[in-house]
Image (cartoon, rainbow, N blue to C red):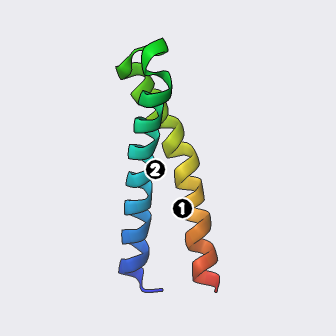
Amino acid sequence: MEPLLFVLALVLGIAASLGAGALSGLRIGGEALGAELAAYMGGFYGLLSGSVAVVIGLVVLAVI
């Protein structure tokens, strides 16, 4: 895998996990916690889980 493609996939994957986490947090907990706090929490936990998944996926692709 080319280094530029690897870095691009890493950055885009992490950005997508952050955005998806914020949107799902807003949708799930927006009423109970307030929109801003729910989006922050969703973005944080989306970033944690999504970045690990992106790194593992890229390592697997690099090995194959």
Q: Can I make out residue 64 in this image?
A: yes
Q: Which residue is drawn at 43% across and 45% down?
A: 20
Q: Is residue 43 above or below residue 5?
A: above
Residue 28 position, x and y percent, is: 50, 27
Q: Residue at x 42, y 86 (%)?
A: 2
Tell me the kind of residue under disc 2: Ser
Q: In which quarter of the image is residue 56?
A: bottom right
Secondary structure of the residue carrying numbered label 1: helix
Secondary structure of the residue carrying numbered label 2: helix
Disc 1, disc 2: CB below 8 Å?
A: yes
Nearest the eye: 47 or 29: 29
Residue at mark 2: 17
Q: Residue at x 38, y 61 (%)?
A: 11
* Label placed on residue 62: none
Q: Which residue is drawn at 35% across and 79% down?
A: 4
Residue 21 position, x and y percent, is: 46, 40
Q: In this view, does 50 lie above or below 60?
A: above
Residue 38 position, x and y percent, is: 44, 24
Give me the C-alpha separation between circle 1 and circle 2. 9 Å
Indicate the quadrant containing the C terminus: top left, top right, bottom left or bottom right. Answer: bottom right
**Circle 1 residues within 10 Å: few <14, some 14–19, many ≥20:** some
Nearest the eye: 21 or 9: 21
State which tag comes first along the sequence, 1 or 2: 2
Residue at mark 1: 54
